[in-house]
Image: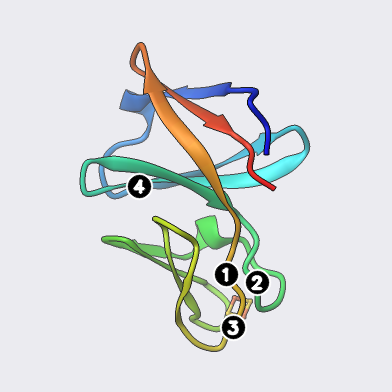
Amino acid sequence: MSDKWHRIAGIDELPEGTMRAFVIEGREVVVCHSRGAWFALDNTCSHAFARLCEGRLRAYRLICPLHGASFDVRDGRVLGAPATAPVAVHRLRIADGQVEVALGD
Ligand code: FES
């Protein structure tokens, strides 16, 4: 787990109910803004290859665009098949109106 915080965007660039992909140290991460909070996860579905940022965000549920698996943005756990493995989550904080992410494992 990294202690290095990456400033990626202003909070006003990520309105409620939206998500956006960022590349941090070569790793693609999707940042979701839902229910007043922000979450960062790996952007690749654990089932096959699909970018989760191209799916849908419904409250805390992130739905893969390819086969419809869903994940909880709070902890990456699987909420719906066909995925069986979670996606990695990353630490996120808001500092001075900016979204900052520190990569997990
Ligand atoms: S690639 Fe995401 S559900 Fe299959």
Of circles 4 and 3, the one toward us is: 3
Of circles 1 and 4, the one toward us is: 1
Q: Does the closest atom of ligand 1 sit within 8 Å of the Cβ of label 2?
A: yes
Q: Position of residue 7 (x, y in %)?
A: 54, 20
Of circles 2 and 3, the one toward us is: 3
Q: What type is the residue that disc 2 sits on? A: Ser
Mark 4 lies on residue: 18
* Helix, strand or loop under label 1: loop
Residues under numbered marks 2 and 3 in contact, where contact means CB atoms less than 8 Å apart: yes
Mark 2 lies on residue: 46
Alpha carbons under labels 1 and 4: distance apart: 21 Å
Q: Residues within 10 Å of mark 3 (few under 14, many from 20)?
A: some
Work out whether residue 15 or residue 7 is closer to the camera in this orientation and state it.
7
Alpha carbons under labels 4 and 2: distance apart: 21 Å
Residues under numbered marks 1 and 4 in contact, where contact means CB atoms less than 8 Å apart: no
| 86 is higher (above) or lower (below) than 82 | above
Mark 1 lies on residue: 86
**Is 61 positioned to the left or the right of 6 in the image?**
left
Q: What type is the residue that disc 3 sits on? A: Thr
Q: Quadrant of residue 103?
A: top right
Alpha carbons under labels 2 and 3: distance apart: 8 Å
Residues under numbered marks 2 and 1 in contact, where contact means CB atoms less than 8 Å apart: yes
Q: Residue at horizontal 26%, vertical 61%?
A: 59
Alpha carbons under labels 2 and 1: distance apart: 7 Å
Q: Does the closest atom of ligand 1 sit within 8 Å of the Cβ of label 1?
A: no
